Image (spheres, grey):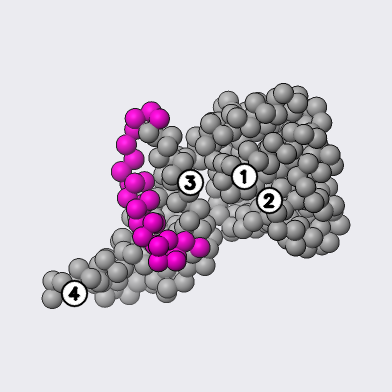
Amino acid sequence: MKTGFIGLGGMGQWMARRVAARGLLTAVYNRTASKAVDLAQEFKVKVCLRPEEVAEQAELILLCVSADQDVLEMVDAVSRTVKPGSVVVDMSTVSSETARTAAALLAVKQASFLDAPVSGGVEGAKSGALSMMVGGDEIVLDRVRPVLSSMAARITYMGATGAGQSTKAVNQIMCAGINQAVTEALAFGQAQGLPMAKVIEVVSAGAAGNWFLDRRGNTMINGTFAPGFKLALHHKDLLICRAMAQSINIPLPVAELTIADYENLMTADFGEEDISALFRLKHKTVMDEGQDER
């Protein structure tokens, strides 16, 4: 199946490489053309100067961009040249309503759409170990699953169009809570003068062990916040979760706290760091409170 890829950002570039390494990639497009040129030269695929060209070259078009408007802009462009029977798979994190709008645009051209957001960060994108949650037609998913499996170790069908994005919203809310708990706990432990590397080791082996603590615990206590998942992007995702929750009158107190904390950090120019940069705020709060007590 001839496959095109649109969006070579922090995640997309590695996902595209996984597809290319299987010999499945035909064409690429990226707004910053140099990224597309570099990848195309390495894997001998076509560089497209417009997203419309990707749809001309491929029967499966993969999207990985940043925001709802970006998805709709790319889908609108692709819809001008997409061939009947083609499939567009969006792996961005956007609202379920955006997914349904994109599907409707493509349906007019007799093309299919799957919303297929992923979880696993840059590490998962590099290794092909992402978890993918998919909404749309399950028969269409089965058609493109061999290509998607080059990027994701787990591909789970969630239901009708938009269900993939709704599931990703659950994931992002949960990530917010885990981030809050882990950063606060480690700041608390550090304030007590504990040997934090040992704390992380022993806690990771028990009931409180989790992926975030395992992958980010030692880096954050050492003041390293290289992005695996950018804080500003998680903030964007949580705003989507907030809007979805408000539409059905459900409160999200942990997500709201995290949105506010992220905004403080973004104001201080930490938005491009990993979400574990929340530790900066928790550590400062603990230290400030300790000084006030003294």
CA–CA distance between discs 3 and 4? 35 Å
CA–CA distance between discs 1 and 4? 46 Å
Q: Position of residue 113 (x, y in %)?
A: 67, 31
- The region drawn magenta spans 247-272
Please state which amino acid type lies under the numbered disc 1: Asp
Q: Residue at x 47, y 61 (%)?
A: 271
Between residues 151 and 92, which one lies in front from this camera angle?
92
Please state which amino acid type lies under the numbered disc 2: Gly
Q: In which image quadrant can residue 36 be found? A: bottom right
Q: Are marks 4 and 2 in contact (CB under 8 Å)?
A: no
Question: Which is more foreground, mark 1 or mark 2?
Answer: 1
Sequence order check: which comes first, mark 1 or mark 2?
2
From the viewer's perspective, is 183 left or right of 28?
left
Give the labeled residue for mark 4.
Answer: 291
Residue 70 — which label? 1
Between residues 62 and 21, which one lies in front from this camera angle?
62
Sequence order check: which comes first, mark 4 or mark 2?
2
From the viewer's perspective, is 112 left or right of 288?
right
Whether 219 is among the magenta residues is no
